[in-house]
Amino acid sequence: MEDYQRALIGRMVDHLDLHAAGDLPLPKLVEDLRGLFEAADPRELAVRDSFNWLHADLDQECELRTEPWAPPGAADDARLAGALSELRAWATRAAAADL
C-alpha cells in the first residue's frame, strides 16, 4: 500500500478511540470505517478481504442493536468488543505496513 492509503487506514484507530470514549455512535463508526477504507482504496485482495470480513462482523453486530427486525437480546457485547478489537489490531497493522 501507498503511504496515503496507510494514513487513511490509520485514521480508523482514531475513530475507534472516539467510539470507545462515547463520542461516536456505533452506526456512525461503522459508516466512517467503511468510508475511510473506500477512500484508501487498497488494491491488494488480501487487504480488501480481511477488512471486509472484519467490517461485516461489526456491521452485523451494529444491526442487531439498531434495526427494528433484530430480536431483543440478539446483540452480544462480547462479540461487539471482539469485533472492535480485531478491527483496531487490523488497522494498526495495516497503517504500519505489517499486513
Image (cartoon, rainbow, N blue to C red):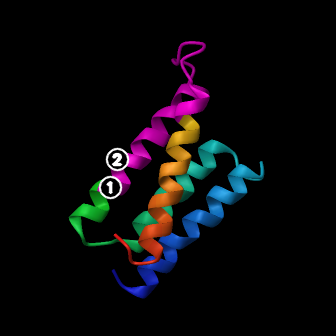
Residue 46 picture quarter: bottom left
Residue 21 forms part of the magenta stretch: no
The numbered disc on residue 42 is none
Q: Secondary structure at mark 1?
A: helix
Residue 38 horizontal side relative to residue 30, left or right: left
In this rendering, the count of numbered labels is 2
Q: CA distance from mark 1 to mark 2?
A: 5 Å
Give the camera-side residue of 12 and 38.
12
Residue 74 horizontal side relative to residue 5, left or right: right
- For the magenta stretch, what is the residue range? 50-79
The three-letter code of the residue at mark 2 reads Trp
Q: Return the residue at label 2.
A: 53
- Quadrant assignment for the C terminus: bottom left
Residue 77 forms part of the magenta stretch: yes
The three-letter code of the residue at mark 1 reads Ser
In this view, 13 is above or below 20: below
Q: Residue at x 60, y 13 (%)?
A: 72
Q: Secondary structure at mark 2?
A: helix
Q: Return the residue at label 1.
A: 50
In this view, 1 is above or below 73: below
In this view, 46 is above or below 27: below
Residue 43 picture quarter: bottom left
Q: Residue at x 52, y 41 (%)?
A: 82
Number of residues whose C-alpha sits closer than 10 Å to that of mark 1, classed few (under 14), some (14–19) or many (20 or more): few
Q: Residue at x 49, y 61 (%)?
A: 35
Q: Position of residue 22 (x, y in %)?
A: 77, 48
Q: Position of residue 90 (x, y in %)?
A: 44, 60
The reply to whether callout 1 and callout 2 are in contact (CB within 8 Å) is yes
Q: Residue at x 58, y 40 (%)?
A: 81
Q: Position of residue 18 (x, y in %)?
A: 71, 57
